[in-house]
Image (tube, rainbow, N blue to C red):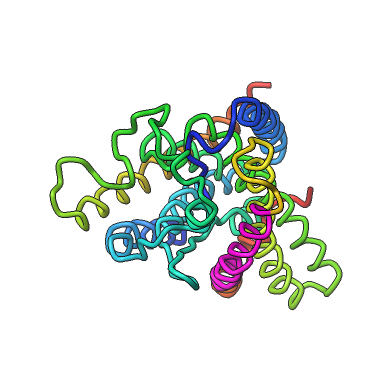
Amino acid sequence: MHIPDGFLNLKTWVIMDVVAGLSVAYAIKKTKASLGERQIPLMGVMAAFIFAAQMLNFPIAGGTSGHLIGGVMAAVLLGPWAATLVMSTIFIVQCLLFQDGGLTALGANIFNMGIAGTVIGYYIYRGVEIFIGKNRGLFWGVGIGSWLSVVLAATFCAIELAFSGTVPLRVALPAMAGIHALIGIGEGIITVAVISLILKARPDLLGMPLQP
Amino acid sequence: MERWILIILGVAILAAIFLSPFVSTKPDGLERVAEDKGFLEKGEGPQVVNSPIPDYLMPGIKNEKLATSVAGLIGVIIVGVLGFAVGAFLKKRRKIR
């Protein structure tokens, strides 16, 4: 879902750069306040793991592919704000080194996938977990939260495209939300699988993020 | 902590090297929508940065699969180091205060 240069008009990408900048600054502040020693190497490996996972496109219906975004996966392990920083790092490297996502669109991409999807998806996960109860709530929360993070990112993307005059909202929104509702299923399955594995092998890793 | 760090990192590196060259090359969700709704060419103009490894293909390597593997490996290492550095830097900043 990386937006290239040219999809968004000037006012839209400038606004999104500002929004992303402010959000990342906030994420830095929150992460600084609660970062534990053990989380530092975890940030590194999650960045590496999610970057690799984002390269692994899987086919979905109709000649399209999807790939993991990984924001909620990172947030479950690191908390939403450290996860935002990990995701932002990934998007910056993808943009500058690999031409994946435009430089002007970097703010929008960071916001859509790294902030809106990650943070909101995380709080959905926490909400479901609290509502259902710890064990089953974890899986349902992770599944729903990660699915929703993809759909939300796609929704914000559609709004930005419409705001730019690139495509009308009534066309972009159902198309983006529809395809990403499917791709989100992949996100949900992969994220639940990974978190389940970690839960079995290293449950202490899931206790790490301080409850915000 | 040590062993699991290495395992996750190992999986990431192996996936980047051995899986990434073989994955689906179909357009992703946004590209598909852009194609279908007619605005794809807006994104095909000159990009603001000229990246060294565009589209995850290491230049100078003829074999596309190998070029992808190398690009993936480089990316995994760079983001891994940066992710770690961000964490370490923020932790250090807190101590100074």
Q: Nearer the viewer, residue A37 or A73?
A: A73
Per the rendered image, the range of residues in magenta is A171-193
Residue A120 appears anywhere in the view: yes
User: In which quadrant of the rendered view does residue A107 lie?
Assistant: top right
Instruction: Indicate the position of residue B77 as horizontal and vertical percent values.
Output: 35, 45
Q: Residue at x 68, y 67 (%)?
A: A142
In the image, farthest residue toward the top: B97
- Asked whether A130 falls inside the magenta stretch, the response is no
In the image, farthest residue toward the right: A131
Q: Residue at x 64, y 28 (%)?
A: A21
Q: Residue at x 62, y 29 (%)?
A: A17
Q: Is residue A187 left or right of residue A29?
A: left
Instruction: Indicate the position of residue A65 as horizontal and vertical percent values.
Output: 45, 64
Q: Is residue A109 left or right of residue B15?
A: right
Residue B94 appears anywhere in the view: no
Instruction: Indicate the position of residue B5 as horizontal and vertical percent values.
Output: 45, 56
Which SS does the magenta portion mostly show? helix
Q: Is residue B42 depicted above or below A198 in this figure?
A: above
Q: Nearer the viewer, residue B3 or A67?
A: A67
Q: Nearer the viewer, residue B90 or B22?
A: B22
User: In which quadrant of the rendered view does residue A106 lie?
Assistant: top right
In the image, farthest residue toward the bottom: A136
- Asked whether A181 falls inside the magenta stretch, the response is yes
Labels in figure, total = 0
Instruction: Indicate the position of residue B74 as horizontal and vertical percent values.
Output: 30, 44
Q: Residue at x 66, y 54 (%)?
A: A171
Q: Is residue A104 left or right of residue B95?
A: left
